[in-house]
Amino acid sequence: MMGVWSLRQAQAAVGGELLGDGELQPAALSMDTRTIRPGDCFVAIRGQRDAHAFAAEAVAKGAAALLVDHGLPFEVPQLVVPDTLAALQRWGQARLQAFRPRVVLAVTGSVGKTSTKELLADATGGWRTPGNRNNTFGLPEALATLPEGLDSVVLEMGMSTPGEIRRLTEIAPPDFGLVTNIGSVHMEYFADGQQGIARAKGELVEGLPPSGAWVHLADDPWCRWVAIQPWARARAVAVGPKAAYGWEDEASHGLHGESFVLRHPGGKVPVRLRLRGAHHVRNAALAGSLAILAGFEPQSVAAGLELAEPLAGRGRLHALGGGGWLLDESYNAVMESVLACAATLLTLDGGETVAVLGCMRELGPDSASLHRQTGEGLRSLGLDRVMVYGDDAGALAAGFGSGASAYPGFEAMRDDPAGLDSLRGDARILVKGSLYWKCSRVVDWLLERLGP
C-alpha cells in the first residue's frame, strides 16, 4: 500500500470524529497550500497562523479531505480531532508501528544531515524521508505514506531547540543512529552554549535501544562527550582514518568526485563517489560504517554509496559559458560547511575563485566573531574574492580582507557593478548561505547570465 490509510483507518489510529466518507484514501498528507496536490488530505495546524483559515484554498486546489480541530463547511470528508499536530504525529507514529521494517536508522548533526541521509539510504537500499522533512511536523507527515514490506528506513532528525529530537525518537524510535558532527548551529537558543547543543543532538543517542549502535567522527570532541554520558546506552562507534571503522587512500578527482577505501573490521572495500569534496568522504564513511554495523553486506554498501547524486542546493555543479563552474551549495550554511565547500571549489579547473555568500544565522552573541573567522578561513584557503550579504557581512568581509565586498542584501549585491555583475563565465563560483537569505536567487541570477 503506497498511499496513506483511509480516513476510517486513520481514525482508528488517532481518534476523533469522522465527517463524510470514511473510506476515502488520500494520496498523502499536506500542511502547505503552496505545494498541496489534488487528492491530498490538508492538515490544518495551529501555529503562528491558524491554518484552518487556508482550508478553503486547499479544497479549491483539490484537497480530497481535511484533518481539522472543528468541522468546516466544505463538501469533503473531514477527520475532526482535538489537536491536529498531535493527530498528525500519532498518524505517522502508528503507520511506522504497523509497517515497521527490519531496521530503522536515524541521522542528525549540525552539518550534512540531508546529504548523509541520502548516502545512508543508498547504502542500505532504504526508504528515506524526502527533502528535509526532519522536524516534528515534516517527519510524521512523511511517515504517513510509508510503504509496506521495507527492509530499512532512513530518517533525518533535526532540531533548533532542546527536546525536538527526543520527540522525534518517540514518534519514530530508531534502531541505529548517526551523528555527522556537533557544531554551533542554533547557538542562540542555548544558554549553555555548545554543551547544550551536544545534549540536544544527543537526544537521538538517548532514544536508541541498548542493543543498538551509533557512529560519529573520531575527531569530534562533542560526539565523544555524548558517548560517555550515562544516558547514552547504545554502543558508540568512532569512525576515522585510524579507527577500526574508517577510510584510507582518499583522493579527489575534481569534477569526477572523490574516491576512498572504506575500512571495517571484516576488511576493506573501495568506493568512488559522484559527490565532490572531502567532507563527503567523511559523510560516506559514516554512512557506510553504520550500514555495515546494521547488517548490510560491505560490497553492496559500497555500490550503494556510489549511486548518490548531488541534491539541488547541496553540491550540484553547473557549467558556465566561459569554461567556469558554479557550485550550488545554496541550501544552508555554517562556518565548517562554508570552508569545506570552498576547499572543494579549489579542486575545479577554471579562472578566479569567488565565494558568494549569505550570512549564517542563529549563532547568538558569537555571530560576528564566527563570521570573521569564516572570512579568515576563506583567505587562508586562497580564494580570490568574497561577496557577502546579510547582517554580519561586514565582519566576514573584514576577516577576508582585500578582495571582499559586503552588502546589506541580495538586491544591493546584484545592482552593484562591482558585485554579481562583475563575475565572468570562466570563474569558479561557490554560492552558499543561510536559508533566510534565499541564496538560490543568486544561483538563478548567475545561471541566467553566465550559463552555457
Image: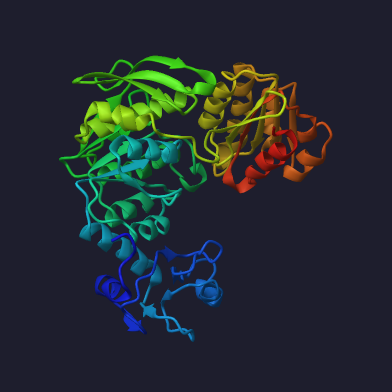
Residue nearest the observer in this picture, 280 or 300: 300
* Number of numbered discs overlaid on the protein picture: 0
Quadrant assignment for the N terminus: bottom left
User: Residue lying furthest front in this view?
Assistant: 452
The residue shown at (32%, 59%) is 2
Q: Is residue 391 visible?
A: no
Q: Residue at 39% of width from left, 36% of height from top?
A: 116
**Residue 326: x %, y % from top left:** 63, 30
Q: Residue furthest bottom?
A: 73
Is residue 291 toward the left or the right of residue 30 in the image?
left
User: In the figure, is residue 348 to the left or right of 25?
Assistant: right
Q: Residue furthest top?
A: 249
Quarter of the image where one finds residue 357: top right
Type of colouring: rainbow
- The residue lying toward the viewer, choosing from 47 and 438, is 438
The correct choice, above or below, for 209 with respect to 334 in the image is: below
Quadrant of the snapshot with the C terminus: top right
Q: Report x, y in % for residue 230.
A: 22, 39
Q: Residue visible at 49% across and 35% down?
A: 310
Q: Residue furthest left?
A: 211
User: Can you tell which quarter of the image residue 82 is in?
Assistant: bottom left
Rendering coords of residue 222 (x, y %): 37, 31
Which quadrant of the figure has residue 9? bottom left
Q: Is residue 41 visible?
A: yes
Q: Position of residue 32 (x, y in %)?
A: 51, 64
